[in-house]
Amino acid sequence: MNVLFTLFALPIFTIVVVHFLQQMQLLDRILSVLILSFLMTFVEILSEKIGWFVHSPDWRHYYTFIGYFLFMWIVLHYHRFIYTK
């Protein structure tokens, strides 16, 4: 686990993504989250090749895709639930 990514990059990324997703229609929102999740999978693969981190041999990169999709979707809906009351 990269602590710098978890403490700084992920929260900033989340704030920016939620800001832009709030301004989109539902279909655009879904497509954007899918594309971002797909891109994060490639960023992870590139990061491994550069040597920034290493996964276990059992890791599958589609786990990253599913994880980012669920993370962004849950954060977006939580944000909308809290701020649209």
Image (tube, rainbow, N blue to C red):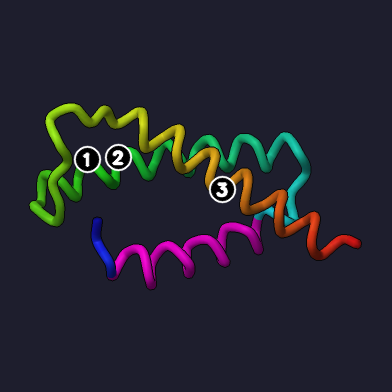
Near mark 3 (Cα within 10 A), the count class, few <14, some 14-19 or many ≥20, is many
Query: In this rendering, would 26 be left or right of 37?
Result: right
Secondary structure found at label 2? helix
Kind of residue at disc 1: Ile
Question: Magenta-highlighted stretch: main secondary structure?
Answer: helix
Which element type, helix, strand or loop, lies under badge 1?
helix
Q: CA distance from mark 3 to mark 1?
A: 20 Å
Q: Name above or below for residue 29 compared with residue 85.
A: above
Residue at 17% from the left image edge and 41% from the top image edge: 55
Crowd around label 1: few <14 · some 14–19 · many ≥20 (10 Å): some
- Amino acid type at circle 3 is Met
Image coords of residue 43 (percent x, y): 29, 46
Q: Residue 16, position in %: x, y? A: 56, 65
Magenta-colored span: 4-20
According to the picture, the residue beneath numbered tag 2 turns out to be 42
**Residue 15 lies in quadrant:** bottom right
Label drawn at residue 72: 3
Where residue 71 appears, x then y in whole percent? Answer: 53, 46
How far apart are the two marked residues, 1 and 2, measured between alpha carbons? 5 Å
User: Among all residues in the image, which is located at the extreme right?
Assistant: 85
